Amino acid sequence: MTVRFALLCMFISCTALVGQANAALIDEVNAALVVIDNDTPTNFSFLFTVPTAALTGIFESRLELSGELTDAGRDGVSAVPFDTVAIAQALIEGSGVIDLGPASFVSGPYGPFTLSTLVDSANFGGTIDNIGLRITFTASGGGDQISFTGKHSLYSVETGIPAPATVGLFVLGLSALGWARRRNVTFV
């Protein structure tokens, strides 16, 4: 019984230690666009930026992208990146930090796709003053309609110090294991 109690205390405290990171939204860039390409295949490029307060530290950069491709001429539709490796790119201080969105050759819904990474302001001259979102693609032409919705969000990352109760549960579990071992109790 003591061993089970000790293992339960240690499991509860380890679970509490793992789930202590919190993230608060700092700023975001939202973009929605619709393109009807009536000509031959055409390159499109859209850039959206917002200034932020001077930020220092480590942050989570998250990029989301979804859309719709409509084949108006029934001759095939496509959206293909033309100057980056992906259709959408999250920018910090004008530099790409996340590339997201593969080429698509299928009429219908596109995505949704989400990707995030940690960024350090030290890699951008010490502070982050702006964030952006770039959407670039080559449309298939022939009257096809392509729409994209994108969002680049910047979140603070706070790692909490374990609460005294969590540390207490962990110590209690270790103590109970030591006491059970001392009494030569067999582990279940």
Image (spheres, rainbow, N blue to C red):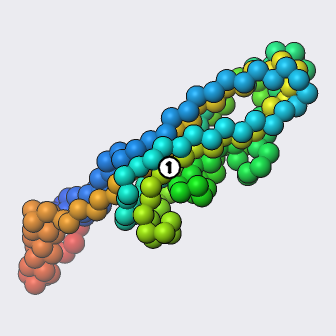
Residue at 37% in and 52% down: 53
Task: State the residue lying farthest toward the bottom.
Answer: 182
Disc 1 residue crowd, few under 14, some 14–19, many 20+, Cα 10 Å: many
Is 62 positioned to the left or the right of 144 in the image?
Answer: left
Quadrant of the drawing holding the N terminus: bottom left
Q: Is residue 34 visible?
A: yes
Residue at 40% of width from left, 44% of height from top? 27
The residue located at (35%, 45%) in the rendering is 25
Q: Place residue 126 in its image quadrant.
A: bottom left
| Amino acid at circle 1 | Ile
Q: Nearer the viewer, residue 67 or 37?
A: 37
Q: Quadrant of residue 172?
A: bottom left
Disc 1 on helix, strand or loop?
A: strand
Question: Which residue matches tag 1?
Answer: 131
Q: Position of residue 185 (x, y in %)?
A: 14, 76
The residue lying at 29 percent from left, 53 percent from top is 22
Residue 30 location (% of width, % of height): 51, 35
Residue 33 vs 115, above or below: the answer is above
Residue 164 position in % (x across, y down): 9, 66
Q: Position of residue 184 (x, y in %)?
A: 13, 81
Tally of numbered tags: 1
